[in-house]
Structures are given as structure tokens and as C-alpha cells.
């Protein structure tokens, strides 16, 4: 069984930084694109950043220049470094991985981690 487990969320002051991690474990043969999404109260879930296996990245306009996504393929782990955080970054952040496991190619989701930014 494949699991994605996130860590690193919490509360931070405006302008501060947080680093999220998401590790995929289980019967995994290959991990393709990994991504971070977020959903704020009353809003739709949105893509924050994505990274392909070879390191190509894509960011939402709202986080460009502030957030950095990276990954360690040896650990099947994706990271999100969040700097210069704003109150509008407050949301539940979830990681997503497109991977080939025991059930073939599927999308998997983590349980989500709360990020709260306030002064």
C-alpha cells in the first residue's frame, strides 16, 4: 500500500518561512510528477507547485519568487520551501504524486497539513 505523509506545517508570522516535506512509501517502482496543492477555507483547491522527475518545475503566479519546490528521488520525497509568507498563504497544503506502484500508475494524495500565517 502506498502512502504519502506530509510534515512541516504549523503557524508562522507574516514574512516568515516554513518547509514542508512529503514522503511516499510502500510498494513503489517509479515516481513521476510530484506536486503541492492548497485549499483555503471557502476556496477551491489550487496547484501551488509541481516538479517532474527530472526537476522541471512549475509554480502558481501567486507564489513565484517566494516558494521553491524540490525533490529527492532516492527518498521519494518532495519539499516545499516557503519564504516571505503572507496571510493569504494560509491553507491546508496537500502533496500529490503520480507514481507506479503495485496498482499500476495512479495519483496519490497526502492527508494534508495546515499552514497558518498571521501577524
Image (spheres, rainbow, N blue to C red):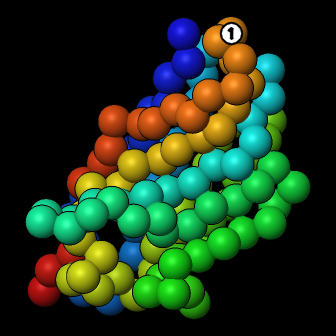
Who's the residue at 70% across and 26% down the image? 105
Q: Image quarter for residue 76?
A: top right
**x, y (%) of residue 70?**
68, 60
Q: Is residue 9 visible?
A: no
Who's the residue at 20% across and 67% down the image? 43
**x, y (%) of residue 72?**
74, 46
Query: Could you say which is closer to the camera, residue 59 or residue 85?
Result: 59
Q: Is residue 61 left or right of residue 13?
A: right
Q: Is residue 44 left or right of residue 50?
A: left
Q: Which residue is mark 1?
A: 102
Q: Is residue 12 visible?
A: yes
Q: Is residue 33 left or right of residue 78?
A: right
**x, y (%) of residue 51?**
70, 59
Q: Image quarter for residue 15?
A: bottom left
Q: How many marks?
A: 1
Q: Is residue 31 left or right of residue 97?
A: right
Amino acid at each position: 500500500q502506498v502512502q504519502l505523509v506530509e510534515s512541516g506545517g504549523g503557524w508562522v508570522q507574516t514574512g516568515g518561512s516554513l518547509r514542508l516535506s512529503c514522503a511516499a512509501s510502500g510498494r513503489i517502482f517509479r515516481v513521476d510528477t510530484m506536486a503541492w496543492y492548497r485549499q483555503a477555507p471557502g476556496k477551491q483547491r489550487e496547484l501551488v507547485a509541481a516538479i517532474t522527475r527530472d526537476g522541471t518545475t512549475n509554480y502558481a503566479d501567486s507564489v513565484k519568487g517566494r516558494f521553491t519546490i524540490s525533490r529527492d528521488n532516492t527518498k521519494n520525497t518532495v519539499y516545499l520551501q516557503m519564504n516571505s509568507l503572507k496571510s493569504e498563504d494560509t491553507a491546508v497544503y496537500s502533496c500529490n504524486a503520480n507514481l507506479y506502484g503495485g496498482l499500476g500508475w495512479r495519483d496519490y494524495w497526502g492527508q494534508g497539513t495546515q499552514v497558518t500565517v498571521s501577524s
